[in-house]
Image (cartoon, helix red, strand yellow):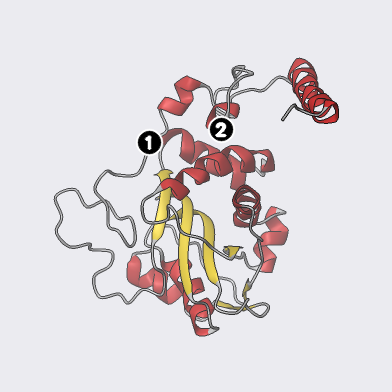
Amino acid sequence: MAEKPKARLSGQMRRLEGIMLDLFYPQHCSLCGCRTEVEGTGEREVFCDTCLSKIQPPAEYHCQVCSHPMDGLMLCPNCDGRNWCLETIVTACRYEGGVRELIQRFKYGRDIALARPLGRLLLRALDDPRLKGRSFDVVVPIPLHPLRERERGFNQAELLARFLARSMKIPKQVLLKRIRPTAQQAGFDRAHRMENLRGAFELKRPLPTDARILLVDDVSTTGATLDACAAVLKKSGAAEISSVVVARG
């Protein structure tokens, strides 16, 4: 069937719009600032090839539940003695080099435009065999305490969840709230992280019936925050909960 003139015109207008945007607002690498190629797609829309090549994937051998590096290990030290409410924590990258810089600029430098390049990296996690081909009903961000969110001006996990939900074409819902402030997890061991989060979250609104939930955050180390949120969702009737993060600390 021949292409309709209206459809042809619409496609031509989109291409023209892209050319004009690139002319007046050329795309630059989110890390080094150099001009990126116009014809780039996916991650190459937001990173040059040089910077993209330096972004490290997760360890080749890792725990299938928490993604802890497992090279030379038979048992995961992070999972030892734990009963997870999460199915799995899938990470897109390692928290080092350019990725660490981007996340810190995003959160602490309040550069919310970096939600897009970090969201592009987060999409890598969906190609992991643990998630590939699976379907979810809703994308849910890890909440910040209201005081911290007001101080920062935004919740980084919510911006990433919004990008991911649009890419997956499923809803993003803020189903959880943090009901008490907690100390920064960095520097705590696993036991202290879990204790720090005890009773920190509760349900904000009812869950969809038997929901299959994908939790989203920027960084995970032991997975304590993600699993504390999963515990609330599981208790409230979620059918299954998995999670994705940009990087593993």
Taking the spot 52% from the left edge, 62% from the top edge, the residue there is 214
**What quarter of the picture does the N terminus occupy?**
top right
What element does badge 1 sit on? Answer: loop
**Side of 4 where 90 appears, left or right:** left
Amino acid under label 2?
A: Gly
Residue holding disc 2? 42
Q: Nearer the viewer, residue 138 or 215?
A: 138
Residue holding disc 1? 56
Q: Nearer the viewer, residue 18 or 46?
A: 18
Give percent across and percent down for residue 4.
Answer: 81, 29
Taking the spot 46% from the left edge, 72% from the top edge, the residue there is 240
Count of numbered circles in the view: 2
Amino acid under label 1?
A: Gln
Say which quarter of the image contains residue 170: bottom right
Counting residues from the start of the chain, the first of labels 2 and 1 encountered is: 2
**Looking at the image, is 100 positioned above or below residue 15?**
below
Taking the spot 23% from the left edge, 63% from the top edge, the residue there is 77
Counting other residues with Cα less than 10 Å from the Cα at mark 2, is it few (<14), some (14-19), or many (20 or more)? few
Q: Is residue 153 visible?
A: yes
Taking the spot 34% from the left edge, 67% from the top edge, the residue there is 190
Q: Is residue 197 visible?
A: no
Q: Nearer the viewer, residue 198 or 129?
A: 129
* Callout in the foreground (2, 1): 2
Counting other residues with Cα less than 10 Å from the Cα at mark 1, is it few (<14), some (14-19), or many (20 or more)? some
Say which quarter of the image contains residue 13: top right
